[in-house]
Amino acid sequence: MKRASCDKFGKLYHIYYLLSNAKDNASEYAQEYLEVIEATKGDQKEKQLASQIIAAFFKYFPSLQCKAIEAIFDLCEDDEASVRIAAMKRLPALCQDKAEFVSKIADILAQLLQLKDPLEYDLASSSLMQILMKHPITVVKSVFKQLKAPENLVRDKCIKFLITKLKTLKKSILTEKVKDVIITETKTVLQDVTAEEFVYLMPFLISTTNISRTPKGQQELLNIVANQAEMDKPLAPLDKESNNVNRLITCVKFVLPFFSTEVKSTKFVSYFCCYVFPEWNNIATLEHGELLHLLILRQLAEMSTHCGKLNNMDTCLANVYRLIEEYMPSPPDNADVKTMPLLNFTFVECLLYVFHRLARQNPQFITTPPRSLKNFQARLTYFSRCVHGCNKALHDFDEKENISDEEMKKRKLSPKLFNNINTLMKDLFYQPSKYQCNVTLSFKVEVATRKKKQKKPKGGHGTNKEQLGSSKSTENQQLYKLPSGKFIDNSQIYRGKGRDGIRQESKLRYKRRRN
């Protein structure tokens, strides 16, 4: 057997030298080339040498090219890593002069990204990049095609390839046509993704293409998010499988920077006021419910700045006002500013800001029954006293007092928070109310300050958003994390947690792609 194997291996070398010496006349040795293709079924050394010969003389045998490619594909699935590696190295050469094979080879390389061995992954990735440099549109489409496949592992690896490799491309390769393909393909894929995939693909779409640079493109992003958040349906916070509240917050986060005088937030503001606020108590029962409340209010406050005319203005204002009444209590009979109730100033800042932005569209709202201007002004007066009391306490605190960094941070930010509340309340005290002041939300100041500090990180974990306003301690409150569940309910039916390899399942997929 060893002698027979040596004879076959030696014959392969003989064919190699024969074809090499024939040069441009190599096509005369079709039978010998066919023997090389058959040698891909031999032992390890024969397979490695055969793959090398097939690639070297591929262009001379047009009638055998399909068969040669199939043989190389089979080697890419071989049990031996050395054989798979040898075969993957040859794939870029097979489409060097044959553009018609680019799509098929790119498909296979994209699937091979799921190989567990780092060396094999790097080789599949680099081979795919070689082809991408010459055929970017075809390769991008092939990689995105894998994102429509049901297997999680290949999807994850293809997303990794897209977000790490495409951003390194030169402008001469990442042309406007390529960017248009990325936009089209990403929009299609985003119709059915997991939470994690959405979190990766949205920044990729925004940073890699020009979609966010024009009002039209920004509106497209808003439409994508509205569709992903299922804003055409009522919010169902208690539906654990859908993870609706986390999904909504995550989706809206990506488009907050794009609202402007040209790109209105009207649809989003309406949804928050009419569908989210009525579920306020149910949201409170969720894990980290108070933090979810905070994030919702902050997002709504930001969006309300660029809200257009609302068709359901009365409903929106009524729901906002209901929460204002909840968080701005009426003064007790024996109100004493020294014994204040537990108040959430951050919530109130957001709610007053939203009311201030929206009520200007219907100035008569506060005087229309069942609302009472007298009751509203009594709440404003009492809350103003509470703000004054807290502000005074902040000014009087001992700077040498041993307090935590978190508490110190809150105390430094509180004056801006209290000033905003006072400024907004002054406008609302007028009869009729005025809507003239412009304030910068305190948490926006906090974010800007944090970004400046993060330019020179000193190590450790980054600082996350923290809740300031409640009189309750929030030291033990966990910060919001992106959801790990599925965005699309039916995706749970067919998406498992990866695969053990590419052997059996990948062969079936290759056969399907070859048809």
Image: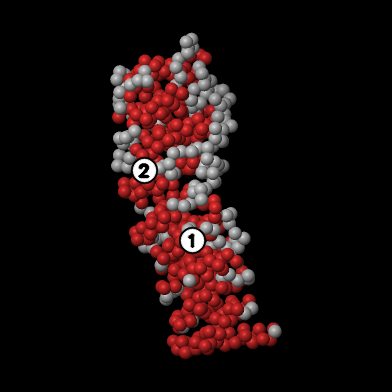
The answer to whether residue 379 is left or right of residue 121 is: left
Residue where numbered disc 1 is placed: 146
Q: Is residue 157 visible?
A: no
Amino acid found under the numbered disc labelled 2 = Phe
> What whole-number distance in Å separates the C-alpha atoms at marks 1 and 2?
30 Å
Quadrant location, the N terminus: bottom right
The residue at 47%/52% (across/down) is: 192
Which callout, 1 or 2, points at the residue further toward the start of the chain?
Answer: 1
Is residue 185 in view? yes
Which picture quadrant has residue 317?
top left
Q: Is residue 243 left or right of residue 500?
A: left
Residue 309, horizontal then vertical, whole percent: 30, 35
Instruction: Give the image quarter of residue 270.
Output: top left
Is 355 or 280 nearer to us in this picture? Answer: 280
Crowd class of label 2 (few under 14; some 14 to 19; many from 20; radius 10 Å): many
Question: Is residue 3 found left or right of 447 in the rendered image?
Answer: right
> Closer to us: mark 1 or mark 2?
1
Residue at image mark 2: 258
In front: 204, or 143? 143
Residue in front for this viewpoint, 204 or 249: 249
- Please report the residue visible at 48 percent of the width from the left and 38 percent of the height from the top: 236
Q: Is residue 349 above or below residue 55?
A: above
Residue at the spot 52% in from the left edge and 88% down from the top edge: 31
* Residue 61 at x, y percent in the picture: 46, 83
